[in-house]
Image: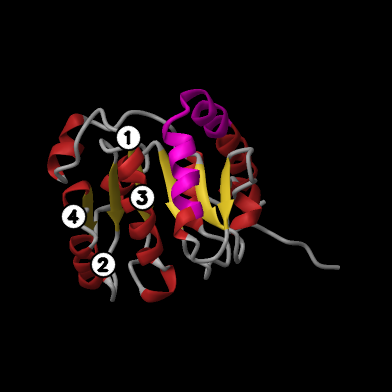
């Protein structure tokens, strides 16, 4: 017999809450504006270019919104250049590598977590975002459909479909009630991936 076991996450570490003003200042992230976050490696297989193109469309509907990309990788400089080419650089923060302490707090600043990567085997980062109370906008590929339940804790979109990704992000950013509902469901789903349960 075979049993599927989640990698698990520490639900005592990743919880909803407000990040301190000092964190926003440290990374030059604007406060009191809609924020979309991506946390993970900035490598080719993560398809960050899809997120950047989607966010360019989001800005046309929600011009005050801001994108925070946390992490580093082989495509880091190329993605910064793409943000320039798309004329959205002023609305995007690339933090680069961050400490574990800052990472936990950065999960709390977003209004939603967006992931365009089709190469996820489970996506611990998505689970950590869900445990932190984030709705999810994710590509319907790999294991992400097991975490993002369409129209329950977020939205799924087709591979490399930046237009559909943008529409999904806009839906959540412009609907406070939906965001609250999705947030609660994300936490419920994440609760089934508690590390203690995995160890047992």
Give the CA distance from mark 2 to mark 3. Answer: 16 Å
Of callouts 4 and 1, the N-terminal one:
1
Residue 133 can be seen in this image: no
Is tag 1's residue or tag 3's residue first in the polypeptide sequence? 1
Which of the marked residues, 4 or 2, is nearer the chain's N terminus? 2
Please tell me whether residue 179 belongs to the stretch shown in magenta.
yes
The magenta stretch is 164-184
Task: Please state which of the two labelled residues, at mark 2 or mark 3, is closer to the viewer.
Answer: 3
Q: Which residue is mark 1?
A: 34
**Residue that mark 3 sits on:** 57
Look at the image and tell me in which quarter the N terminus lies: bottom right
Percent coordinates x, y for residue 86 in the rendering = 24, 60
| Residue 39, percent from left and from top | 37, 55
Residue farthest top in this picture: 177
Sequence-first disc among 2 and 1: 1
Dot label at residue 89: 4
- The residue closer to the viewer here, 86 or 141, is 86
Secondary element under disc 4, as helix, strand or loop, is helix
- Residue visible at 45% across and 59% down in the picture: 162
- Identify the disc placed on residue 79: 2
């Amino acid at each position: 017999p075979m049993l599927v076991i989640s990698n698990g996450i520490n639900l005592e570490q990743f919880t909803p809450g407000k990040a301190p003003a000092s964190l926003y200042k440290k990374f030059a992230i604007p406060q009191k504006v809609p924020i979309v976050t991506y946390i993970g490696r900035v490598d080719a297989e993560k398809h960050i270019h899809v997120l950047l193109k989607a966010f360019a469309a989001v800005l046309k509907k929600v011009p005050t919104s801001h994108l925070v990309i946390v992490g580093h990788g082989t495509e880091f400089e190329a993605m910064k250049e793409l943000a320039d080419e798309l004329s959205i650089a002023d609305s995007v923060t690339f933090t680069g590598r961050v400490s574990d302490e800052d990472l936990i707090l950065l999960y709390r600043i977003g209004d939603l977590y967006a992931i365009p990567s089709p190469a996820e085997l489970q996506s611990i980062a998505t689970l950590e975002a869900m445990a932190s109370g984030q709705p999810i906008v994710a590509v319907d590929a790999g294991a992400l459909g097991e975490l993002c339940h369409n129209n329950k804790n977020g939205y799924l979109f087709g591979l490399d479909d930046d237009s559909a990704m943008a529409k999904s992000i806009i839906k959540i950013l412009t609907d406070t009630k939906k965001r609250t509902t999705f947030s609660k469901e994300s936490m419920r789903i994440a609760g089934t991936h508690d590390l203690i349960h995995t160890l047992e």
